[in-house]
Image (cartoon, helix red, strand yellow):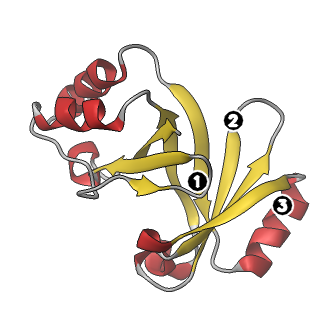
Amino acid sequence: MTDAGALAAAAAALDGPPRLHHVGVVQPDFEAAEAFMALTGLKEAYRGYVEPFACWCLFCCADGPTAIELVVPNGGQLAKFNRGAGGLHHYAVEVADLDVVRDRYAARGASLLMPEHVKGAGPFLCNFLSPISTRGVQIEFVQPI
């Protein structure tokens, strides 16, 4: 899928302009996450463990409606992200129905990363658009539950 095709598919799948849900930043460990929060003035609102991705997700409050998610791997692929240094990992947009998003991308030759949607660290289900379709940009789709 071309970049233009991926953008067109995203717009069609979202039925309008996306609402940014959060931005995910991988941290190598909890100490680094605490230092990041102290430096940036973020306050942790809640955290949860996401087993399929082997990571803790710390959702932090910022000024405004968009959260910052600090992702702390507990082994797995995320521990290797950016050679273990962490960094900006993904942005997430809220959608009404992950199944509709999956089907619309599939009709355009793109797929979601996980075969089944995953219960996220908060009150939502999530899945990622395969980065093969976006030249490596990680886009997460979040469906509130």
Relative height, residue 20 to residue 83 (above, below): above
Q: Dot 3 lies on which element?
A: helix
Viewer-nearest residue: 144 or 32: 144
- Residue 116 at what x, y percent from top left? 28, 56
- The three-letter amino acid code for the residue at tag 3 is Met
Residue 51 x %, y % = 48, 73
* Element carrying mark 2: loop
139 in relation to 16, above or below: below
Q: Position of residue 103 (x, y in %)?
A: 18, 34
Residue under circle 2? 66
Question: In the figure, is residue 63 to the left or right of 28?
Answer: right
- Determine the secondary structure under disc 1: strand
Assign the N terminus to one quadrant of the image: top left
What is the three-letter code of the residue carrying label 1?
Gly
Does residue 78 appear in the picture of this structure? yes
Residue 24, disc: 1
For badge 2, the amino acid type reads: Thr
Does residue 137 appear in the picture of this structure? no
Q: Which residue is mark 3?
A: 37
| Residue at the image point whose x is 49% and y is 76% from the top | 54
